[in-house]
Amino acid sequence: MSEPRLLAGAPIAAEIRATVKADVAAFRRRHGYVPTLAVVLVGRDAPSAVYLQQILKGCRNVGIEGRLVEIPGRVSAARVRRRIAELNDDPLVSGIIVQMPLPKRIPLSTVIEILDPAKDIDGIHPLNAGLMTLGYAGFLPTTAQAAVELLKRSGIEIAGRHAVVVGRSNVVGKPASILLLRENATVTICHSKTRDLAGILRTADIVVVAVGRPRLVTGAMLRPGAVVVDVGINVVEGKLVGDVDFESAKEVVSAITPVPGGVGPVTNALLMTHLMRAARAQADLRHAGHPLAGAR
Ligand code: NAD
């Protein structure tokens, strides 16, 4: 097989960012302020902190205000709820993301129950999950959206093809499979209890892997000519690697995303588009004097 096409995220992210920059400038002219993205970090999880720095840099790149909200890991769930409620009520904050994983003592429901769906720009609230599932406009989980957007913007045909998603988390695998279905793929979801992963993968035209296990998927498991999106991010011997064994996969596939530099940059850029959409919707409500504007 000849060298596969590398589905790099950077050019796609740059394209998206250019549009967001123009949006931010137009918003500022119209409303007289720059919207803020609040990134909440509960406790001090080192990998999360690195990821958050990338988001804050992404904000700076497009002229959005990024606000890091650090909450000590030892505080009570009630304190976390109160802090998020304050951000819900802050009219300058248009979007809120909460870095996962949370400390074990703080259940995810603590955040989900309080987060204003209108500011939930990473689509973790059940309202947004429901809107996505039924095909309405809500906020999509950004990483899942990035995986599909990368395929679409790279000109990969999705409709009618067999897409296999490995992983069924609420943040990546499950939404990615719903979004691929929306693009008319025939979708199979594999997970930790799937019996014959290799056998199923060998029937896939498109493979999206989001597990968090280095080199789980090898070239021998893939169909010649398949297109692979590797969402996984793992650190092995100080280096970032995906869930797909790139060296063996590249001998078989027709196109593959690199790790790093594939899904990650697109995720970051798309998050900024969500923030601007949230900011516009909230500002429009306020301008219209809507009774619920700014209220919860
Ligand atoms: P998760 O741990 O919540 O879910 C992992 C999923 O993998 C589960 O659904 C599980 O059933 C499945 N799984 C586990 N072992 C398996 C096996 N042997 N075979 C098949 N399926 C198996 O993880 P997540 O939050 O969905 O993240 C997945 C990966 O994506 C991680 O590496 C994470 O770091 C990465 N990630 C990347 C980005 C990005 O922007 N690129 C964003 C979020 C997450």
Image: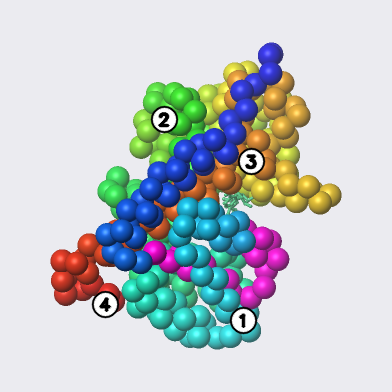
In the image shown, does 37 or 295 lie closer to the viewer?
Answer: 37
Residue type at tag 1: Pro
- Magenta segment range? 34-51
Helix, strand, or loop for circle 1? loop
> Which residue is denoted by mark 4 in the rendering?
295
Circle 4: element type: loop
Q: Horizontal placement of 174 versus 8: left or right?
A: left
Q: Which numbered marker is on residue 72?
A: 1
Residue position marked by numbered label 3 in the rendering: 261
Residue in the picture at 37% in, 72% down = 92
Eyeballing the image, is 12 above or below 17? above
Residue at the extreme top: 1
* Category of crowding for the residue at label 2, using alpha-carbon neighbours closer than 10 angstroms: few (below 14), some (14–19), many (at least 20): many
Disc 2 on helix, strand or loop?
loop
Q: Position of residue 261 (x, y in %)?
A: 63, 41
Does dot 3 land on a helix, a strand or a loop?
loop
Looking at the image, what colour scheme do you see? rainbow
Query: Residue 113: image x %, image y %?
Result: 40, 73
Q: Residue at x 67, y 43 (%)?
A: 260
Residue type for callout 3: Gly
Q: Quadrant of the C terminus?
A: bottom left
Apparent side of residue 235 relative to residue 196 in the rendered image (left or right): right
Q: Amino acid at mark 2?
A: Ala
Image coordinates of residue 220 in percent, x first then y, are 71, 25
Q: Where, quadrant-wise, is the N terminus in this rendering?
A: top right
Q: Earlier in the sequence, mark 3 or mark 4?
A: 3
64 within the magenta span: no
Q: Is residue 170 visible?
A: no
CA distance for labels 1 and 3: 31 Å
Q: Which mark is residue 185?
A: 2
